[in-house]
Image: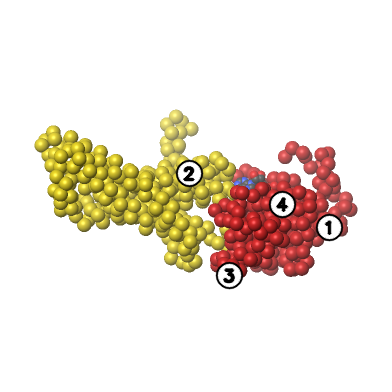
Amino acid sequence: MSALTKPLGALGHATLAALAMIGRVALFAFDALSHMVRPPFYAREFLAALFQIGWLSLPVVGLTAIFTGGALALQIYAGGARFNAEAVVPQIVAIGMVRELGPVLVGLMIAARVTSSIAAEIATMKVTEQIDALVTLSTHPMKYLTVPRVLAGLIVVPALVGIGDVIGVFGGYAVAVNNLNFNAAAYLKNTVDFLEPLDIISSLVKGAVFGGIATTMGCFYGMNSGRGAMGVGGATKSSVQAAAILILAANFLLTGLFFSV
Amino acid sequence: MITLSGVHKTFGTNQVLRGVDLTIDSGTSMVIIGGSGTGKSVLLKCILGLVKHDTGTITLDGQDVTKADRDAFLARFGMLFQGGALFDSLPVWQNVAFRLLRGSLKKPKDQAREIAIEKLRRVGLKPDVADKFPAELSGGMQKRVGLARAIAAEPEIIFFDEPTTGLDPIMAGVINDLIREIVTEMGATAMTITHDMTSVRAIADNIAMLHDGVIKWTGPVSQLDKSGDPYLDQFIHGRAEGPIEAVR
Ligand SMILES: Nc1ncnc2c1ncn2[C@@H]1O[C@H](COP(=O)(O)OP(=O)(O)O)[C@@H](O)[C@H]1O
Ligand SMILES: [Mg+2]
């Protein structure tokens, strides 16, 4: 092969592999959805997943949101001061948190915390033959492992995003009132008056999509893990990487869908 | 009756099964022997459909296993995995009673727990292990919990992948007796993989030796010592010299 066609061939292979991967993920997600609507439904596993993904993620979501909201207020104040627009802090913090940073940062935190743990747990079950054992005990791994986690992600991540939005706005409020001499009542009024229902709806929809992506990728890479400890490590790494990139790409698409005119 | 004919399985370039032909009659105990890495575990997994074989056919009572209704098919089987494969998120008794706590065989919780404790007793484990987690048990204990789980729902066909590996000789004797009892008293069909020649003689009605991806020898346990097959003789006497290479 000539020096010209070799890199082209490699590029072609990589493209085909990426497309095949997207196809496999799509099939997996579709399979998970189809199992979601067919019995049996494992309620205990679902409740455990709600607790793991929702309740135990609260501290990390709260801390991420409050620091980001605070930093945002400082930035907008400093930036706005360059053209005498310091007064827009409440509005920009609200819109920035609710439309973008709340859902994206919560989504990424869930990818770090939840996707990784789902992938590592399921991959370990795979390499120690626990998934095979489930099958021989007449329990469908998709129903028992994937459905409860993905459903919990779809339901609880929007709630986390909502909480993150509120805490983020509060972080901005606290910094503005304490350090930047904003009037507390006026700040809150400006925030509430400025936000539109669509801002909040878009935030929660993003949360649901990101929750679905994060849990699905954890399950997908876990179920398709290679053998041994290397397999588990590889599955965990790939799952977080894929979830993070897909969340950012989905965020771009959803923002376009909701707010482009 | 389980029949395999011309079963092939290749992983990448590794040709593991190269035309396995074997019949296991209902209510009998078949023991599979053969060097480690020859594909004995893969063979059991092919029958259960956990690994898809490439070519050849596997039938259960005349029906192709790949075309059978999965749920009804699997409901007839119990399997002890080589590594135990216990669910480490569940306590021991819930592992054993897994099938009795959900699905079509669902029973009330206390009844399922009672059955689990009874099965644990049969594999030589005291009731106090019931509430422990698998990670708190020794390898041999985990193996026996796996065995209790395989027999808990009293399946018709039971596969045991190295049931006595890692057990002391007395406990191995208990497990051998248990497997024999399951076949003779409950009329179950058993397929056991083992390297332990005492187990082979205690458990088997028939024996099949897997070597180089095919069944090299098969016959009743009474023929084991008079087969005249050099491969089988080398294996059962554990000789380093012979037609089976020591480096594989
Ligand atoms: N899922 C798998 N992927 C790739 N190779 C496998 C897989 N399972 C088993 N093998 C290979 O098949 C061969 C037979 O394995 P196994 O059936 O476990 O041997 P044994 O006879 O000791 O039970 C080994 O070489 C093993 O590496
Ligand atoms: Mg094996």
Q: What's the residue at 72%, 47% (across, down)?
A: B166
Q: Secondary structure at mark 1?
A: helix
Q: Where residue B221 is drawn, which disc sits there?
A: 1
Front residue of this view, candidates B12 and A81: A81
Front residue of this view, candidates A175 and A75: A175
Q: Earlier in the sequence, mark 3 or mark 4?
A: 3
For chain A, the rendered hue is yellow
Q: Which residue type does callout 2 highlight?
A: Thr
Q: Secondary structure at mark 4?
A: loop
**In 3D space, how far apart are the residues under numbered discs 1 and 2 (Cα atoms)?**
48 Å
Badge 4 residue CB within 8 Å of ligand 2? yes
Q: Which residue type does callout 4 highlight?
A: Glu
Q: What's the residue at 11%, 35% (across, down)?
A: A83
Q: Label 1 is found on which chain of the structure?
A: B
Q: Where residue B162 is drawn, which disc sits there?
A: 4
Front residue of this view, candidates B65 and A159: A159
Residue A67 x/y as whole percent: 29, 41
Q: Are marks 3 and 4 in contact (CB under 8 Å)?
A: no
Corner quadrant of residue B1: bottom right
Q: Where residue B233 is drawn, which disc sits there?
A: none
Q: Where residue A236 is drawn, which disc sits there?
A: 2
Q: Where residue B107 is drawn, which disc sits there?
A: 3
Q: Secondary structure at mark 2?
A: helix
Tell me, yes or no, whether dots 4 and 1 are on the same chain. Answer: yes
Give the mark toward the camera: 1 or 2: 2
Give the mark toward the camera: 4 or 1: 4
Q: What's the residue at 43%, 65% (across, down)?
A: A37
Q: Are marks 2 and 3 in contact (CB under 8 Å)?
A: no
For chain B, the rendered hue is red
Q: Which residue type does callout 3 highlight?
A: Lys
Q: What's the residue at 82%, 39% (across, down)?
A: B240
